[in-house]
Image (tube, rainbow, N blue to C red):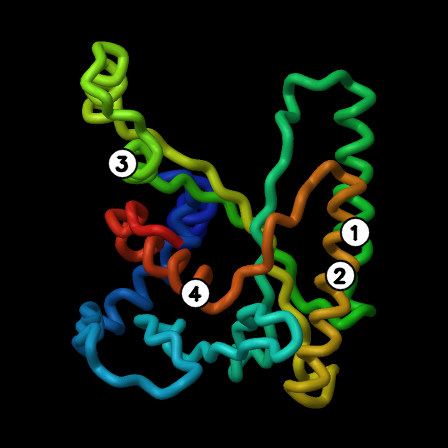
Amino acid sequence: ALWVPLAAAALVSVGGRPLISWLPILAHWHTRSLLDQTEYRVKPGRVRQIGQLALPGDAARLRLVVSPTTGTALVHDPVARTLTAIAQLSAPAFDLVDTDAQHARVDGWGRLLASLSPSSGVARVQVLARTVPETGVDLSRYWAEHGVRDGSWASQIVADLVATAPSRARHESYLAVSLDVARAAALGKAAGALERQMTAIATAAARADLAVERWLDKSTLGWVLRTAYDPSAAALTP
């Protein structure tokens, strides 16, 4: 009577997760329901303290620190005592290259991960991939600014194509590197150590045919967070 439900909780999957992994999620949800903490409302025009991200739930504790030297947005978690920088990556097609090139890229990625070891103060490395819907706003804006509308049939055809362009999706990849603030002894020292890691990451990523397009600054990080909660805001320019 005891082992059968325990075995079922460990072996039966719902939505790709075993039942036992749903227990803390359900417990957390019911606790928030009892405390009336399942909704988050905020006035966009309300004045906030500098450095607050104004995120709901457990993410409300996160703070924003801007690097004075590079302008990179660093996310400080005072509870976990970590400082995180986020890089936007781009990579060429992997499946279409030959086997030797694939092995070289995998080896380069392995060396990059090996360099981000706990001995260097790195607490966590997270690879993030997301798909952002696009509504053709950029295409329409480009046509409005640079299009030749001289009344010709070619101009009319292009205008009709732009007006009826279907929505598409853009794929984005990010690499988040968190440094242990406790081991760095101070937030300022952690920021300096994290910036050194950022330089090393950009160099190591190139060996894996990965390009660090940019380290997210304050405005870009805000745009990424906004579109995560409000996908319709993806039409805005980051």
Q: Residue at x 65, y 17 (%)?
A: 96
Distance between the alpha carbons at the discs numbered 2 and 4: 21 Å
Distance between the alpha carbons at the discs numbered 1 and 4: 25 Å
Distance between the alpha carbons at the discs numbered 4 and 3: 25 Å
Q: Which residue is mark 2?
A: 199
- Disc 1 residue type? Thr
Position of residue 138 measured from the top left corner of the image (x, y, whole percent): 33, 39
Q: Which residue is mark 4?
A: 219
Earlier residue among tags 4 and 3: 3
Contact, mark 2 vs mark 4 (Cβ under 8 Å) = no
Contact, mark 1 vs mark 3 (Cβ under 8 Å) = no
Q: Which residue is mark 3?
A: 144
Contact, mark 1 vs mark 2 (Cβ under 8 Å) = yes
Q: Residue at x 63, y 67 (%)?
A: 178
Q: Please identify the quarter of the rendering in which residue 116 is found.
A: bottom right
- Numbered disc in front, either 1 or 3: 3
- Disc 2 residue type? Thr
Tag 1: Cα neighbours inside 10 Å, few (<14), some, or many (≥20)?
Answer: some
- Disc 3 residue type? Ala
